[in-house]
Image (cartoon, rainbow, N blue to C red):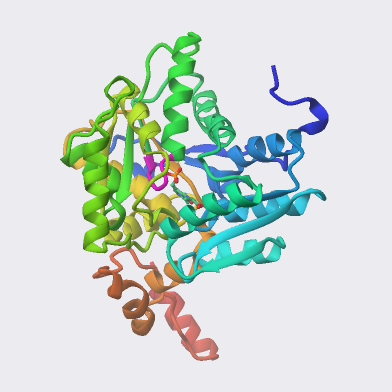
Amino acid sequence: MPFAPPEKIVTIGEGQTILQQSSAVARYCGIDDGRLFLQYEGLNPSGSFKDNGMTAAVTHANMVGATQAACASTGNTSASLAIFGSCTNWLEVIVFVGSGKIAYGKLSQALDYGAKTIQLLGDFDDAMQRVREVCAQAGIYLCNSLNPFRLEGQKAIIYRVLESLAWEPPDWIVVPGGNLGNCSAFGKALLELKDLGLIDRIPRLAVINAAGANTLHELYEQKGLRWNGGRPDVAVRDDYFGEMESAGRRAATLASAIEINRPVSLSKALRALDACDGVVREVSDQAILDGKAQVGAGGFGCEPASGASVAGAKLLREEGVIAPSDRVVCILTGHQLKDPNVTVAYHSGDADDFDRLLRARGVQEAAHANQPVVVENDLEKILEVVARFD
Ligand code: F0G
């Protein structure tokens, strides 16, 4: 039964995304042909998976009569909330983003869709803290994934994956981890589907952090923090955050969508990992960009953070955790056009751009670059270039 009366439901056509088998990406990861699938959540109206949850949150905002909604964002949540705001005539949207911390495509969306945009002189973790304070004090409806309706909506990604696989669960679902809402929603969806008897087994979940924003990896894989039946050892978490604070350590990755050190859904993510016999890995920005380039060359493409799924699947395969014959679904969370600066810097061969945008962040080479060729406006010379293409 729908949780909202039909006249309150706010939808913008989200959820029309697809699962695509990719032989090229399978080969790159060392997985048998026909066994690797890419779930393109970038095909949602705002270009990321966030629309799946935002439809539920904005519907709930409508039910409670909210007229203002806000979120902190690394760019996609803000783009999603902004498009929902622009498609309704009753919701004013305020977004908090870290100044200089979000990709241009995403900033352009918030601005174009008319969201009031606060560029905080800080990063996502600062923005997240402030938006909670502001929403509590000013009575504004909060649309971050702390909002349980967001996570309920994001369960739909799992429903679509399973529907595309004729309800035969894959062996692995691999997803990038940032604020950890998505993996939390996945765990909840899978537990519920199992309880309902709609699937007979729960796939394993792999959550992939960027190495420069690796809180979950550190806590889960290094410090052994576990769900522990709903009683995680919070001292382990608090010590970790305390140490991070005193060292002044900030999240830093080219995959700006997941540049987060204090994930708000940490506990729920532990529950999901527990339910799904999960693993967490960290991957370098180099591996993320190489993975992203493979998705571009062997599929529809994706934004940097989504490349972490492919980099993570490759790593787990190399470790022998994923077997060559396993059926693996990589969730591609955002659209290829979200972060053109990073993509062009990777491919173009422009040394200045490469040094400024990529090398400065630890990327050594663009191993899978597809360099454009500059040629004079002369037919002979153009033909010479074309003849050299194989
Ligand atoms: N991939 C993309 C493209 C994202 O935008 C995000 C999160 C994630 C992965 C990680 O998902 O937070 O549920 O673990 N972006 C948020 C935002 C934080 O503000 O757009 P998560």
Q: Is residue 193 above or below residue 34?
A: above
Q: In the image, residue 164 lies at what x, y percent? A: 53, 27
Dividing the picture into quadrants, the one containing residue 366 is bottom left
Q: Is residue 280 magenta?
A: no
Foreground residue among 348 and 274: 274
| Residue under the image location 51 percent in, 51 percent down | 334
Q: In the image, residue 98 lies at what x, y percent? A: 48, 65
Q: Is residue 176 magenta?
A: yes
Q: Is residue 80 left or right of residue 232?
A: right
Foreground residue among 118 and 377: 118
Q: Residue furthest top?
A: 197
| Residue under the image location 53 percent in, 52 percent down | 133
Is residue 21 at all visible to an observer of this figure? no
Q: In the image, residue 55 lies at what x, y percent? A: 66, 38
Which of the image's four quarters has the N terminus?
top right
Is residue 7 at all visible to an observer of this figure? yes
Q: Is residue 219 left or right of residue 189?
A: left
| Residue under the image location 39 percent in, 80 percent down | 353
Foreground residue among 366 and 224: 224
Which of the image's four quarters has the C terminus?
bottom left
Dividing the picture into quadrants, the one containing residue 326 is top left
Foreground residue among 62 and 168: 62
Q: In the image, residue 286 lies at what x, y percent? A: 28, 61
Q: Is residue 65 left or right of residue 251?
A: right
Q: Is residue 269 above or below residue 263?
A: above
Chief secondary structure of the magenta portion: loop
- Over which residues does the magenta segment extend? 175-180
| Residue under the image location 32 percent in, 44 percent down | 208
Q: Residue furthest front?
A: 137
